[in-house]
Image (cartoon, helix red, strand yellow):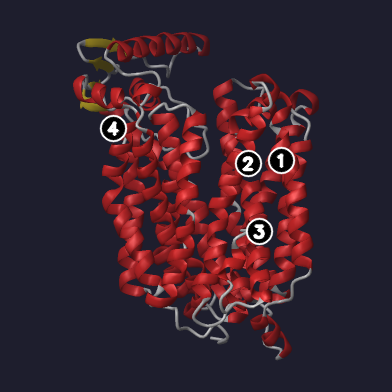
């Protein structure tokens, strides 16, 4: 953000300060929010040690998901306050809540010290983070847009759009820097706390800057004229004239934007580490490199939207992403783990099972118990990055897995004692692992075979799509709603689109992969959502760049 003054031509000192202060604070909020997800494995060891490692990791991810789930509720709570008492004071409150919650996570004693109280407090702090983020984005975007001169709202608000990416990048860099000065054991024991504790300094800087800022001119004018809303929630969602705009903003803009955003920055990282088995440090550096290269394009597309419109750029991003996700991810496999690609082509895997024993593996809260032979086999193969096909077997029989010419019998755990089920599960896992290894499926990517330049290029393209759909969207959402209920109305569809449609993408994609047995099948989720958004957006959503944002209705 230090380059903000480079915008200088035609921008006043006060406007530069508005952009810098709002964006800087939002970077720090995203930094706080992403720390937890990046350190989920370590947090599981610290706060969920009373259960086995796998269950602990699931619980840690569930706590991470809680932050996404509550974001729309934060949008309602703080959006209402922002429309009633002002933008400036509301997003001052949100950043204080976010920073304090993150700092307290770094101070929180672990399970071994405080017992069950530790994970309960951790989840509570995570919920506070989600609520705060639900209020921060709408406030910052509205505040900057209402300071921007007509014809430059896309350029001004595009700086806010860089903040989620910069926050993710900052969290990755701080974590990697901290890891470099600790041993693995030392980081897991104490070093992981440092990135959380640093947040107090970062937020303190942002609060100090924001305290010197003035309220937005649109809200100040409206308040002076006595036209502020006394019931923003009712006006936003109980009146069809505004509710239909909220629904169009959700399904015609933010749902597609959310899945494109999470595919390009989060699912790509998941695919590199969990599917292609590229080591996490290498994968993080590749993602960080793509973020550095692509981030300036948030400004490019935001500025371009002032000239040609917001809608064409966002719709083009959704359409191009939907059309190219399959070849891009297939390319990432080709350049990232060619041995896996070869094994899938040369040693196909077939699961033969009673179709009645094969169920949906969608598990957003991590509580599903897999007991049927079909479900156990499919889940294990999906986690091992092994593509497979499914054939119907005789009713009542257990699943049989064929890897090349090797046949392995599954087992049904539904009527087995826990100890016996565990023993059979371990034996089955070893058998599958040995068979896929013998068939050429690698346990991890070979660094010598990775084409880093081509992977970086493909990841850059994915993030470029993110900049297309995300760069202009803050300006467009602000311009869709009247001043008196803008904070409330724009925040809810944004956080449902990003927190729910986007936040549930990894879980949904994994369930689709396990269901079909194809490592690329999970991409159908973002492709379908982005396509729906493209159709609805093209047909029903109008251009907004020339809208009067001072209008009351």
Q: Which mark is residue 196?
A: 1
* Badge 1 vs badge 2, beta-carbon distance below 8 Å: yes
Which residue bears the numbered disc 2?
35
Q: CA distance from mark 1 to mark 2?
A: 7 Å
Name the residue rendered at 50%, 36% in the picture: 285
Q: CA distance from mark 3 to mark 2?
A: 17 Å
Which numbered disc, 3 or 2, marks the residue that appears first in the sequence?
A: 3
Q: CA distance from mark 3 to mark 1?
A: 17 Å
Name the residue rendered at 52%, 34% in the picture: 366
Which residue bears the numbered disc 3?
24
Vertically, is 32 above or below 402?
A: below
- SS at badge 3: helix
Residue 360's x, y, as percent?
Answer: 37, 35
Camera-side mark, 1 or 4: 4
Asked if residue 196 lies left or right of residue 162, the reply is right
Asked if residue 74 lies left or right of residue 340, the reply is right
Which residue bears the numbered disc 4?
334
Which numbered disc, 4 or 2, marks the residue that appears first in the sequence?
A: 2
Q: Nearer the viewer, residue 231 or 4?
A: 4
Name the residue rendered at 74%, 65% in the picture: 210
Q: Residues within 10 Å of mark 2 (few under 14, many from 20)?
A: many
Q: CA distance from mark 4 to mark 2?
A: 30 Å
- SS at badge 4: helix
Q: Residues within 10 Å of mark 1 (few under 14, many from 20)?
A: many
One can see residue 522 in this view = yes
């Amino acid at each position: 953000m230090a380059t903000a003054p480079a915008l200088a031509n035609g921008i006043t000192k006060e406007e530069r300060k508005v952009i810098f202060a709002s964006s800087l604070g939002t970077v720090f909020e995203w930094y706080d929010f992403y720390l937890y997800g990046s350190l989920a494995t370590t947090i599981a060891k610290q706060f969920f040690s009373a259960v086995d490692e796998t269950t602990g990791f699931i619980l840690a991810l569930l706590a991470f998901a809680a932050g996404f789930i509550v974001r729309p509720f934060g949008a309602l709570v703080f959006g209402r306050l922002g429309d009633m008492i002002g933008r400036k004071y509301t997003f001052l409150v949100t950043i204080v809540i976010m920073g304090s919650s993150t700092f307290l996570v770094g101070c929180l004693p672990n399970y071994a010290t405080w017992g069950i109280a530790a994970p309960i407090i951790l989840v509570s702090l995570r919920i506070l983070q989600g609520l705060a983020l639900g209020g921060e984005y709408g406030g910052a975007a509205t505040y900057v847009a209402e300071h921007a001169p007509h014809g430059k709202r896309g350029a001004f608000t595009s700086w806010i759009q860089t903040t989620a990416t910069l926050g993710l990048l900052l969290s990755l860099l701080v974590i990697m820097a901290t890891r470099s000065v600790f041993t693995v054991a030392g980081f897991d024991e104490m070093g992981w706390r440092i990135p959380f504790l640093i947040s107090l300094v970062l937020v303190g800087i942002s609060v100090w800057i924001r305290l010197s800022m003035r309220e937005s001119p649109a809200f100040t004018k409206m308040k002076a004229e006595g036209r502020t809303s006394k019931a923003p929630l009712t006006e936003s969602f109980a009146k069809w004239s505004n509710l239909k705009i909220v629904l169009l903003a959700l399904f015609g803009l933010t749902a597609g934007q959310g899945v494109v955003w999470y595919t390009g920055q989060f699912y790509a990282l998941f695919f590199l580490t969990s599917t292609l088995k590229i080591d996490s440090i290498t994968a993080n550096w590749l993602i960080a490199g793509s973020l550095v290269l692509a981030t300036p394009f948030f400004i490019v597309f935001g500025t371009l939207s002032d000239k040609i419109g917001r809608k064409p750029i966002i719709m083009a991003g959704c359409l191009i992403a939907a059309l190219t996700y399959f070849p891009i991810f297939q390319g990432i496999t080709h350049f990232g783990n060619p041995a896996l690609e070869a094994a899938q082509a040369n040693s196909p895997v077939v699961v033969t099972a009673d179709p009645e024993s094969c169920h949906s593996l969608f598990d957003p809260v991590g509580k599903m118990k897999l007991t049927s032979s079909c479900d156990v086999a499919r889940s294990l193969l999906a986690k091992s990055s092994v593509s497979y096909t499914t054939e119907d077997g005789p009713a009542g029989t257990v699943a049989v897995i064929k890897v090349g010419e090797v046949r392995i019998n599954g087992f049904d755990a539904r009527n087995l004692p826990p100890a016996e089920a565990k023993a059979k599960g371990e034996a089955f896992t070893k058998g599958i692992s040995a068979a896929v290894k013998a068939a050429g499926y690698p346990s991890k990517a070979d660094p010598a075979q990775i084409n880093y330049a081509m992977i970086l290029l493909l990841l850059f393209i994915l993030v470029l799509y993110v900049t297309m759909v995300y760069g202009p969207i803050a300006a467009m959402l602000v311009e869709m709603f009247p001043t008196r209920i803008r904070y409330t109305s724009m925040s809810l569809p944004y956080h449902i689109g990003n927190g729910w449609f986007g936040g549930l993408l990894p879980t949904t994609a994994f369930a689709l992969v396990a269901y079909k047995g194809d490592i690329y099948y999970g991409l159908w989720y973002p492709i379908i959502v982005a396509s729906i958004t493209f159709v609805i957006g093209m047909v029903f959503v109008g251009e907004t760049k020339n809208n009067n944002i001072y209008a009351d209705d």
